[in-house]
Image: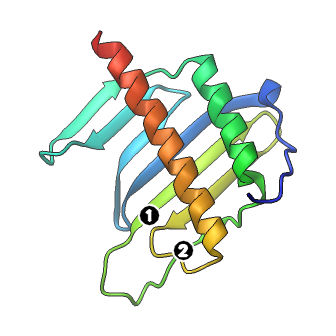
Amino acid sequence: MMIKNAPYRYSDFQSLSIEYGIKDSLINKYDSKTGDYQYLNKRDSLVKIHLRLTSDDLLYLHHKAADLGFWDFPADETGDTASKEKPVRYIIEFKYKKKSKRVVFDSNYGGDPKLVDANKQLIKEIDQSLTTAENRLKK
């Protein structure tokens, strides 16, 4: 568990955004403010939908970010750029009335393993929330 420091209050929360993909092309995107969501599905087709997370979903993600220590993550967690592999880059941003927190995380980041695990857990939680919200749309 990362050190907890939550200078960001949910009452000041405005939006959450995530972008990810190969470094040159962050084609997968979600912005809670606009509801715009696009991603490549398993057949490499670009899916664009309008998806709103509920206030409960956003509150859950805000608390999950606080629990994982997101506010203390370094802003730049980029990996080895000389590597032949193409790491997945994630840009996660939580926006509040007076401040925001933006983290750039590469899947090949070589920092503290606890920090890497915390990043991966937050990404997983965001992805699960988006999947759940998309499944609600289909019902």
Q: Residue lying at the far front in this picture: please name it.
A: 1
Label 2 and label 1: CA atoms lie apart by 8 Å
What residue lies at 36% left-to-right and 24% top-to-bottom? Answer: 134
Q: Marks 2 and 1: CB-CB under 8 Å?
A: yes
What residue lies at 28% left-to-right and 14% top-to-bottom? Answer: 138
The quarter of the image holding the N terminus is bottom right
Q: Nearer the viewer, residue 95 or 117?
A: 117
Q: Describe the element under mark 2 as helix, strand or loop.
A: loop
Q: Position of residue 113 (x, y in %)?
A: 61, 73
Corner quadrant of residue 58: top right
Corner quadrant of residue 103: bottom right
Q: Describe the element under mark 1 as helix, strand or loop.
A: strand
Q: Position of residue 94 (x, y in %)?
A: 66, 42
Numbered circle sitting on residue 73:
none
Say which amino acid is labelled 1: Arg
**Res 76 visible:** no
What residue lies at 81% left-to-right and 24% top-to-bottom? Answer: 11
The color scheme shown is rainbow
Answer above or below: position of 90 versus 47.
below
Going from N to C along the chain, the mark reached first, 2 or 1, is 2
Mark 1 neighbour class, 10 Å CA radius: few under 14, some 14 to 19, many 20 or more: many
Numbered circle sitting on residue 78:
2
Answer above or below: position of 52 versus 110.
above
* Direction from residue 85 to residue 73 in the image, left or right: right
Q: Which residue is mark 1?
A: 89
Q: Position of residue 55 (x, y in %)?
A: 62, 18
